[in-house]
Amino acid sequence: MASVLLVEDNLLNRILVRDVLSLHGISVAEVETGMDAIEWVRRNPPPDLILMDIGLPGMDGIEAMKEIRSMEGFNSIPVVAITASAMVGDEERILSEGFDGYISKPINTEELVRVVKGLIGL
């Protein structure tokens, strides 16, 4: 079974992503902050993909992604940004930070499934 680590501080967004991906046979581990994500990856085998909110409290999603990518075994894990920033140029800016994909909020469930499945090869 494919696995995703979801890093999202909004409970309703976590429920939506978990429920949608679960319907497609993808297991979802959930954490609320960038620091929680770093602790999670230190204690668990790498997931197939990480969905990372950009606007996290404390350590933002960009910082957390860079820290996780520096850890052994996690440098090639696809990381997809989830963000409410949907202005012209935001997607390019976020992808230039090193993310493998971009999903804007409010989350379009069809786009979510397409991006996740595409990056993990389902």
Image (cartoon, rainbow, N blue to C red):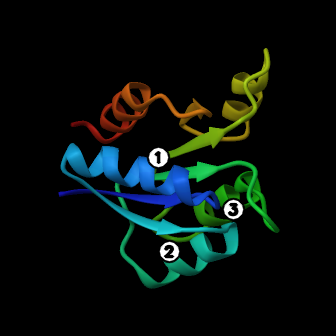
Question: From what the image shows, is residue 62 above or below residue 58?
Answer: above
Q: Is residue 25 above or below residue 118?
A: below
According to the picture, the residue beneath numbered tag 3 turns out to be: 64
Which mark sits nearer the N-terminus, 3 or 1?
Answer: 3
**Quadrant where the N terminus lies?**
bottom left
The answer to which of 106 and 53 lies nearer the viewer is 106
Which residue is found at the position 79% from the left and 65% from the top? 59
**Circle on res. 78:** 1
3 horizontally vs 38: left or right: left
The quarter holding residue 100 reads top right
Secondary structure of the residue carrying tag 1 is: loop
Residue 62 appearing in the image: yes
Residue wearing tag 2: 41
Label 1: how many residues lie within 10 Å, few (<14), some (14-19) or many (20+)? many
Instruction: Please identify the quadrant where the C terminus is shown.
Output: top left
Q: Residue at the far right: name it.
A: 58
Query: The residue under label 2 is which amino acid type?
Result: Val
Q: Quadrant of residue 83?
A: top right
Mark 2 vs mark 3, CA separation in Å: 11 Å
Q: Residue furthest bottom?
A: 43
Q: Give the residue displayed 44% in from the left and 55% down from the top.
A: 15
Q: Please, what secondary structure does the residue beneath circle 3 have?
A: helix
Going by the image, does 37 lie left or right of 113?
A: right
**Residue 117, image x and y in percent?**
30, 36
